[in-house]
Each structure stands twice: as C-alpha cells, then as structure tokens.
Image (cartoon, helix red, strand yellow):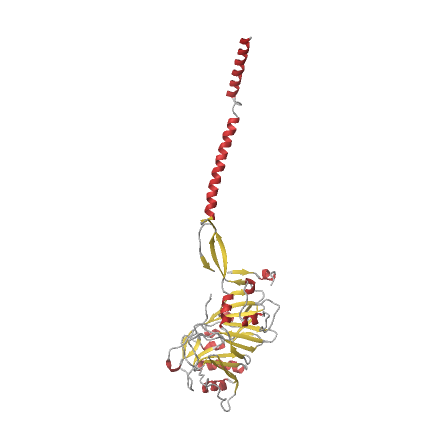
C-alpha cells in the first residue's frame, strides 16, 4: 500500500478485482410474483431483504458494484450500478429510492469493469541480486393506471434491455398499492421503512426482469441520474435485512470523499483507493467514465479543470445500524493511497545472479591485492640488504682484501 500525505499531494501537479459486495445499499431486492398477493417471509440473504414467492429457493446477488458522481454545477447525481442474480427468477425486483425523479437508462458493463481495473493494485518492482524471486500483495405487463383515490404518481414506465422499469411518487400506501397491483410485492418489513422516504418526498424506482428477459447472459448495468442537494447513497431500506450488509462504492469527484452521515460510526469503512488514476498513467476509455471525470470529447457531458479523484469505499455493518443514508462529502486533506503489490526481479549476467558475481570478483580482487602486498614486502627486503650489521662487516672485509692485494702488487 502506497500512501502520500496531504502536504505532499498539494505539491504535485495535477484497487482485485477486489471484494464484490452483495448489496447495492439503498436498493431492495424482492422476488415478486406476477400477480397480486402477499410475499412470503423475507429470506436470510447477504443481499438484504429477499421475498421468495411460493417458498422457492432465494436468489442472492452474486456481483454488484456502484459508481457514483455528482456534478456540483447542475446538482445532478449519477449512480451506475450492476446487478447479477444466481437464479433466473422472473419478477425479481429492485427498489431504488432517490431524492428526486430520476432518469433511468441502460449502462455499459465496461463502466464497472474499467473502474475496477483503474483502481486495482499497482506493481512495484524490487531488484534482487541473490536469486530470490517472489510476488506478493500488500411487453412487460407493467403500466396499469394508479388505483382510484390513491396518492401515487406514475412518472414513467419503460422497458430497458431486460428490465421493466417504473418510476413512482406519492405516499407509501399509494406506492405500495400500485406495486402490488402490477406484480411488485413487498414484505411488510420493508413497508415501514418505505414510509420514511415517502414523507420526505422521495421517488421510488422499481426495476425487475421482464417476463421474456434473456437471463442467460450478464445483464447490463442501469444508470440513474437525479437531482440531489448532496452526494448520497440510499441505505435506510437495508434495516429490513436479516444479516450484515456490505456495499462497494467507487466515488468520482474533484476531491477524495469521506462519510458524513450519523451511521458511519457504527459501521466498518475502508478506503483502499484514494487517488487520481490518471496520475498512475491510466487513460479513461469508457464513455460514461470519461463523462464523469470530465475528459473533453464529443460525447462528454462536462469538463472540469480539476483532476478528478476516485475514492473506493467498502462499507460493512449490521442492518439496524443503517438508520441514515450514506452521505459523502469532500475530504481534500485525506492522504492519497492506492494498493500495491511487489514483484521481486533477480538481476543476472549470463544467468548468474549479480550478487554472487560480485562476491566472486571480490574474492579474486582480494587475492590479487594480497599477492601484490607479498611481492612488495619481498622487494623491499631485497633492497634493504647490505645496510645491516652483517652488510657492514662484509664491506670492511672486502676493503681489507683489496688493500692487501694492492700492497703486494707494489
């Protein structure tokens, strides 16, 4: 894990796949029948509340991710979310509350895949001289008119790829009645929490697989664009769940973000990625992501002079702790951080680790130096002959012999 402190980041110019959560928080997954009736008791499922009609096996969310962003100039928030079930059950329903009437449209699987790739751990190279090599990681049938006398407003009814999508407003009783008459059946545990949103004037989007949907392939994500005074992720419906919840969010903004809601202290919050992927040489390719990060282009919705940063958040908590929605606010002083893993590479010459070559060369050089030292000592000794006591005696004897020889020759 590489961390850059806030002072350091101000001096700069501007994930794993990781764990896949089992709930897009704030959404309610319900398995509904196509007719009017009461749902069976909510099943125990990591994806929140699941109503199983006829007592059949529950379907669980296998893979869900969400990308969030809010345009501060227009006040429009965008959520791109993916949903995948482990069982093809016609009528499986997702209920999404939003503070304003959303525009719902099809998304692209490349949006979620690229975001996961952009935040994946980065490789850091460690050079090894000795030969150790290791790698490790830090026709839908929907659209009946509102029941007479009910306080419900049908904003839109549409077919998006494999989904029937309806956007409703009004009080909890009216919304519940409309959903029931059109095959969206909610368990009683959910209705009491639905009331909270209705009183505040929120809108409800119900999404379910169409009766003729092809569930053999991966379903495309859905994109929600809606007005919101703050960057928010709906969560209060999760109080109806029967087991601990987990949500995996990727938030795009001009700053890294942190939780600002009262529920945050009762849950586990991890932020393994807080950085601008472009500063890690990532080039955004997906059209939706290019729009959200502000890359200029013919299809981009906006441009910002600030470098967009991505905050990855993994949130876990018991159902009863989600008494508020997730509210996110700028956190510009947070330390930049992104996950890394280390690859150890051996430096070799002719297949031999450099470390051992250096040792061998060291031994040879040491031997040569020792030999040179011995030779120097021997040479110094030979030069010193004749300067000691015995040398003096030899010189004197030689001088006497030469004098005697000269005398005899005279």
Q: Position of residue 320 (x, y in %)?
A: 46, 75
What number of labels is visible?
0
Q: Position of residue 20 (x, y in %)?
A: 46, 69
* Residue under the image location 37 percent in, 80 percent down: 55
Is residue 329 in view from this perspective?
no
Q: Residue furthest bottom?
A: 148
Q: Is residue 348 above or below residue 4?
A: above
Q: Nearer the viewer, residue 68 or 265?
A: 68
* Residue under the image location 52 percent in, 29 percent down: 380
Image quadrant in which the C terminus is located: top right
Q: Position of residue 278 (x, y in %)?
A: 56, 64
Is residue 69 in view from this perspective?
yes
Q: Nearer the viewer, residue 126 or 215?
A: 215
Q: Position of residue 173 (x, y in %)?
A: 49, 86
* Residue under the image location 48 percent in, 45 percent down: 358
């Amino acid at each position: 894990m590489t961390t850059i402190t806030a002072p350091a980041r101000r001096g700069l110019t501007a994930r794993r796949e990781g764990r896949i959560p089992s709930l897009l928080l704030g959404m309610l997954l319900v398995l509904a029948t196509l007719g009017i009736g009461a749902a069976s008791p909510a099943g125990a499922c990591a994806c929140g509340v699941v109503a199983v009609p006829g007592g059949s096996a529950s379907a669980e969310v296998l893979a869900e991710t969400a990308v969030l962003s809010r345009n501060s100039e227009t006040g429009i928030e965008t959520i791109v979310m993916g949903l995948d079930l482990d069982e093809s059950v016609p009528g499986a329903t997702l209920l999404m509350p939003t503070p304003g009437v959303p525009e719902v449209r099809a998304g692209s699987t490349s949006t979620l895949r690229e975001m996961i790739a952009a935040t994946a751990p980065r490789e850091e190279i460690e050079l090894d001289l000795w030969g150790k090599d290791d790698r490790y990681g830090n026709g839908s049938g929907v659209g009946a008119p509102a029941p007479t006398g009910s306080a419900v407003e049908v904003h839109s009814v549409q077919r998006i790829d494999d989904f029937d999508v309806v956007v409703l407003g009004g009080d909890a009783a009216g919304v519940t009645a409309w959903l029931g008459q059109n095959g969206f059946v909610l368990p009683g545990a959910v209705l009491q929490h639905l009331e909270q949103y209705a009183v505040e004037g929120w809108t409800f989007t119900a999404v379910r697989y169409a009766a003729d949907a092809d569930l053999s392939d991966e379903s495309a994500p859905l994109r929600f664009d809606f007005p919101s005074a703050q960057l928010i992720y709906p969560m209060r419906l999760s109080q109806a769940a029967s087991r601990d919840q987990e949500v995996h969010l990727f938030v795009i903004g001009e700053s890294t973000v942190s939780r600002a809601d009262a529920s945050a202290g009762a849950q586990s919050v991890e932020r393994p990625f807080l950085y601008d992927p472009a500063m890690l040489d990532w080039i955004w390719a997906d059209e939706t992501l290019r729009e959200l990060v502000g890359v200029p282009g013919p299809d981009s919705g906006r441009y910002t002079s600030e470098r967009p940063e991505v905050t990855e958040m993994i949130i876990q908590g018991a159902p009863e702790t989600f008494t508020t929605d997730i509210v996110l606010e700028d956190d510009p002083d947070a330390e930049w951080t992104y996950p890394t893993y280390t690859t150890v590479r051996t430096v070799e010459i002719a297949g031999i680790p450099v470390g051992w070559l250096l040792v061998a060369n060291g031994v040879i050089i040491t031997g040569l130096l020792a030999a040179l030292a011995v030779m120097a000592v021997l040479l110094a000794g030979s030069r010193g002959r004749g300067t000691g006591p015995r040398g003096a005696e030899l010189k004197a004897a030689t001088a006497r012999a030469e004098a005697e020889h000269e005398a005899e020759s005279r």
